[in-house]
């Protein structure tokens, strides 16, 4: 089977159904009635809106404009429009003033560029009857849309959820039209089927920023740790060795370390981020395209405006609270080819448990109509994290995947199982002892690490005391002192056992 998602003069039946439905909406509603259209990544949104532009001009003899947020998307859109016979012009910094009676049926422009052209009076918009907004979830076009008060407005996106929670999509668009879903496109052979491997990762050290997603600094601290680098490599070796692989990261440090870790293991890997010069970026992407089994690790790139059907594996080496970003990342591997019916997803950020598997059904209308409820659900993940180990302390335990311990949950479980509450403290001490041993080469070093846990121990003891109810300060002080003493003893026992077993192992 050939790649069915490439733009074609003849839309597929599901695309044709959507085109017909959109024109019915256009004809039924007055001008400037904003409509939002959803179709999954790889479903061919560009095919749909290119055909809409062509038919709109044929029917109404009015020009269209397609707005994008990246120059790569401008070039792709222009080519797609040409393939269906639409004369179009990309409005960039090189464009001088266009005469009113020019031959173009459609303009393609980046938002900021269009703002500048309109400000400078270099573009006449009175004859534009249709505005299409690609990647509409960015939702940053509201002021600009005021320039097209008599035009039909259509937004297109794979995920109708605004990137700005304070400005939901339903404030810009009056209605959502949902296209074919991911599983249906897989069943019909238009998209590749995902084989998903999930690894439960301890994310307690991650913190959320002002926009609600996990911060780069805390992500870098976690995913740059030796334990996570080893997990990344081992998961790749187990499920994706020899396959063309994309690795998505949240921070540049983590991406660079991942690249170095793969290279040191004898695996061809390159790194890309927004600081990479254009010439080098083009060279790396060309290398990735032509090289069998290539591994490309990146940050803030390749989620949109990048189409490489030969990608066989996508590794989510990060966690995100953005449903849109989640779908964009996984979607980079979903292109279907004659030789590619399946692709692999390796999730190292608990994203599948947070959002559901990529090909599971999503009620987009519910999310569009009630975005606040969905945002609250995502915020729950950060709000339930009562305590997180500081990143400066986390770096002292690079070989430990699990560094958090939910005292309240453990106490509740002990009560439900009829176990003495003291087992909570016992299990907490065992985890701390294991962490110290895993990251030390001697007893002295392990005991020094234990001292660095003083504040963590104090917090756990305080939480445990709350679970018990009324406790005196003397009792809490004793608990903390006893915890430290038992931790030191257990560390020495663990290390003595290791030394005893070492001769047998050799």
Image (cartoon, grey):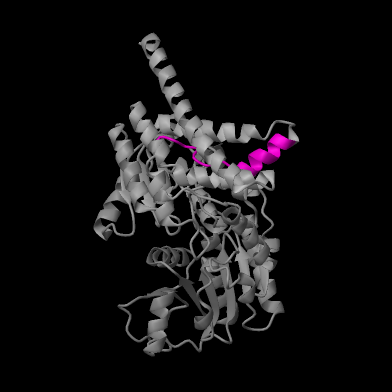
Residue 455 is situated, as x and y percent measured from the top left of the image, at 47, 47
- Comparing 212 with 307, the one in front is 212
Total residue callouts: 0
* Residue at the image point whose x is 36% and y is 89% from the top: 120
Q: Does the magenta portion include 188?
A: no
Residue 181 in the image, given as x and y percentages of width and height: 64, 53
Q: Residue furthest front?
A: 474
In the displayed structure image, the side of residue 368 where residue 207 appears, left or right: left
Range shown magenta: 399-415
Please say whether residue 352 is visible from this viewpoint: no
Report the front residue among 457 and 387.
457
**x and y percentages locating residue 7 in the rendered image:** 50, 58
Quarter of the image for residue 87 reads bottom left
Q: Quadrant location of residue 477?
A: top right
The percent position of residue 54, horizontal first and vertical second, equals: 54, 71
Which quadrant does the C terminus fall into? top left
Residue 412 highlighted magenta (yes or no): yes
Q: Is residue 398 above or below residue 136?
A: above
Picture layout, residue 266 above or below residue 130: above
In depth, the one of 305 and 321 nearer the eye is: 321
Residue 104 in view (yes/no): yes
Residue in front for this viewpoint, 365 or 506: 506
Q: Residue at x 54, y 69 (%)?
A: 164
């Amino acid at each position: 089977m050939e790649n069915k998602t490439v733009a074609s003069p003849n839309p597929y039946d599901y695309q044709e159904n959507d085109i017909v439905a959109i024109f019915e909406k256009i004809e039924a509603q007055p001008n400037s009635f904003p409509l939002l259209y959803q179709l999954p990544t790889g479903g061919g949104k560009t095919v749909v809106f290119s055909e809409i532009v062509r038919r709109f001009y044929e029917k109404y003899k009015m020009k269209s404009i397609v707005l994008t947020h990246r120059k790569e998307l401008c070039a792709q859109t222009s080519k797609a429009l040409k393939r269906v016979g639409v004369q179009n012009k990309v409005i960039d910094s090189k464009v001088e003033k266009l005469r009113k009676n020019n031959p173009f049926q459609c303009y393609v422009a980046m938002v900021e560029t269009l703002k500048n052209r309109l400000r400078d009076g270099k573009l006449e918009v009175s004859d534009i009857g249709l505005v299409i907004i690609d990647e509409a979830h960015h939702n940053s076009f509201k002021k600009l849309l005021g320039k097209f008060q008599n035009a039909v407005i259509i937004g297109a996106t794979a995920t109708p959820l605004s990137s700005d929670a304070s400005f939901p999509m339903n404030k810009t668009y009056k209605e959502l039209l949902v296209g074919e879903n991911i599983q249906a496109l897989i069943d019909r052979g238009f998209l590749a089927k995902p084989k998903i491997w999930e690894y439960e990762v301890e994310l307690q050290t991650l913190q959320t920023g002002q926009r609600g997603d996990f911060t780069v600094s805390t992500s870098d601290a976690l995913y740059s740790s030796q334990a996570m680098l080893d997990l990344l490599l081992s998961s790749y070796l187990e499920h994706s060795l020899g396959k063309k692989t994309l690795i998505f990261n949240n921070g540049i440090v983590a991406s660079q370390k991942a690249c170095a870790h793969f290279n040191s293991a004898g695996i061809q890997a390159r790194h890309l981020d927004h600081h990479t010069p254009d010439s080098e970026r083009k060279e790396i992407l060309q290398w990735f395209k032509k090289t069998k089994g290539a591994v490309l690790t990146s940050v803030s790139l390749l989620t949109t405006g990048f189409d490489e059907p030969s990608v066989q594996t996508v590794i989510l080496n990060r966690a995100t609270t953005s449903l849109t970003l989640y779908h964009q990342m996984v979607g980079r591997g979903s292109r279907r080819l004659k030789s590619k019916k399946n692709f692999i997803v390796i999730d190292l950020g608990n994203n599948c448990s947070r959002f559901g598997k990529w090909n599971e059904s999503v009620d987009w209308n519910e999310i569009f109509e009630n975005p606040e409820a969905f945002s609250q659900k995502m915020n729950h993940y950060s709000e339930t994290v009562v305590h997180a180990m500081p990143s400066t302390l986390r770096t002292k335990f690079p070989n430990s995947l699990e560094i958090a311990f939910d005292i309240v949950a453990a106490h509740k479980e002990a009560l439900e199982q009829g176990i003495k509450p003291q087992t909570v403290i016992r299990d907490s001490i065992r985890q701390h002892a294991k962490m110290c041993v895993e990251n030390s080469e001697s007893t002295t070093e392990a005991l020094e690490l234990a001292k660095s846990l003083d504040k963590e121990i104090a917090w756990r003891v305080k939480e445990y005391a709350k679970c018990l109810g009324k406790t005196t300060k003397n009792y809490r002080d004793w608990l903390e002192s006893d915890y430290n003493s038992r931790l030191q003893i257990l560390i020495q026992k663990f290390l003595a056992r290791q030394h005893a077993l070492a001769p047998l192992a050799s």
